[in-house]
Image (cartoon, rainbow, N blue to C red):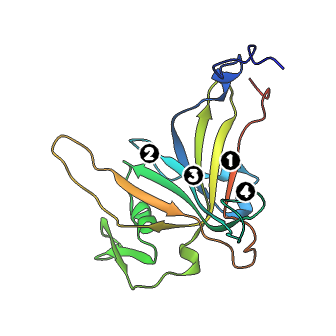
Amino acid sequence: MSLSGLKTHGITRETVKNFIIDAGAVYYFSDEDYNTPENWKIMGATRGGNSFTIEQEIRAMEVDGAMGKVKGMDRITNVIPTIVANFIEMSPDQFLRALPGASAVDFPNEDSTHKKITRALEIALSDYIDNIALVGRVNGTNQPFIGIIKNGLAEGNMEITTTHKDESVLTITFQGRFDPDALEEEPWEILYPKQGIDY
């Protein structure tokens, strides 16, 4: 066996076609619209990029006699899929997404120019968003990368900071939730183009 022919880098002719580039867009859609992407809706313009994360905890089960971790004795104990979006585009709907359980009414009446947003410390099933997707561009193809979280709900604080000669950005951290009727299915999906398709 000779090792002298091994490359010392991973670059191939296909490498440039497999970069995920640019900021991407954040969409939301119902389960009924899953197979009709033309019905997916963009949440709003962003600035500063966005992220898709699958946080996972894998427990290595310990047994007497083993000096370390043993193949086949690992199990997944926690999964939290997350999309962090940095919205520069504001709207009452954006604030409602950032504050699960909140509601909006016309203020002070139907002829007014404002919405009043308040909350009564209760999250309803309707506050969960069926699907939230970060759609990014795969270099060299017209097919996108799509990271989806299921049953999304905003986590963390809602904060808007105003700065002289700058625009406010609202960061919302959406986390996926398991479906109580399908607890064996993790609440996320990744759609990635097949190599050689539409390049």
Q: CA distance from mark 2 to mark 4?
A: 22 Å
Choose mark 1 or mark 4, whichever is in front.
4
Q: CA distance from mark 1 to mark 3?
A: 11 Å
Task: Report which residue position mark 2 lands on.
Answer: 45
Badge 1 vs badge 4, beta-carbon distance below 8 Å? no
Task: Report which residue position mark 3 lands on.
Answer: 27
Q: Examine the rendering and report whether any part of residue 85 can be seen.
A: yes
Q: CA distance from mark 1 to mark 2?
A: 18 Å
Choose mark 1 or mark 2, whichever is in front.
2
For the point 78% across and 35% down, the residue is 194
- Asked where in the image residue 78 lies, by quadrant, the reply is bottom right
Q: Amino acid at mark 3?
A: Tyr
Badge 4 vs badge 3, beta-carbon distance below 8 Å? no
Spot occupied by residue 66 in the image (x, y as percentages of width and height) = 71, 64
Please tell me whether mark 2 sits on a helix, a strand or a loop. Answer: loop
Q: Amino acid at mark 2?
A: Ala
* Direction from residue 118 to residue 139 in the image, left or right: right
Q: CA distance from mark 1 to mark 4?
A: 10 Å
- Asked where in the image residue 31 lies, by quadrant, the reply is bottom right
Badge 2 vs badge 3, beta-carbon distance below 8 Å? no
The image shows a total of numbered marks equal to: 4
Please tell me whether mark 1 sits on a helix, a strand or a loop. Answer: helix
Badge 1 vs badge 2, beta-carbon distance below 8 Å? no
Please tell me whether mark 3 sits on a helix, a strand or a loop. Answer: strand
Task: Report which residue position mark 1 lands on.
Answer: 38
Q: Given the current orientation, which residue lies at the most extreme right position? A: 1
Looking at the image, tell me whether mark 2 or mark 4 is earlier in sequence order.
4
* Direction from residue 46 to residue 13 in the image, left or right: right
Mark 2, Cα crowd under 10 Å, few <14 / some 14-19 / many 20+, is some
Q: Amino acid at mark 4?
A: Tyr
